Image (cartoon, helix red, strand yellow):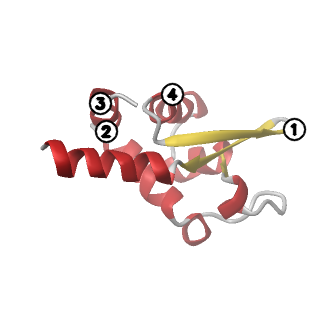
Amino acid sequence: MKPIDVFKALSNESRIQILQWLKEPDLHFTPHEGIDMTETGVCVSQITDKLNMTQSTASQYLSILQRAGLISTKRIGKFTYYQRDEEAILNMAEYMKQEM
């Protein structure tokens, strides 16, 4: 994970909001087809609906967060689920604490 990629990913309010929602998915989303959101993640369609934007825009935002290393994906059938990468977020926080 490159710090510059993380800072670029966090330079958008909607992407920050996604990370905040994914921190506690049970508070912000209804389970998708019986999926345990804490274990599996949140379906892209749920994130799209909550953002109130097109799926292509939401998917682009999620891709940016994934390339930065802040979220991970899991594919189940035709659905893609997203969840925070807590270890990567902690590493970035530690980097900021030590280097900045």
Q: Quadrant of the N terminus?
A: top left
Amino acid at circle 4: Gln
Residue occupied by mark 3 = 8
Whether residue 15 sits left or right of residue 8 in the image: it is: right
Say which label, 3 or 4, has the lower sequence index.
3
- Tell me whether the residue at label 1 lies in contact with that at label 3, contact meaning CB atoms closer than 8 angstroms: no
> Image check: 23 left or right of 40?
left
Residue position marked by numbered label 4 in the rendering: 60
Mark sitting on residue 77:
1
Looking at the image, is mark 1 or mark 3 earlier in the sequence? 3
Tag 1 or tag 2, which sits nearer the N-term? Answer: 2
N-terminal label among 2 and 4: 2
Specify the quadrant that holds the C terminus: top left
Please say if the residues under marks 2 and 1 sit with CB atoms less than 8 Å apart.
Answer: no
Residue wearing tag 2: 12
Residue at 49 percent across and 48 percent down: it is 51
Tag 3 and tag 4, C-beta contact below 8 Å: no
Please, is residue 15 above or below residue 1 in the view?
Answer: below
Distance from disc 3 to disc 4, alpha carbons, whole Å, reads: 13 Å
SS under mark 4: helix
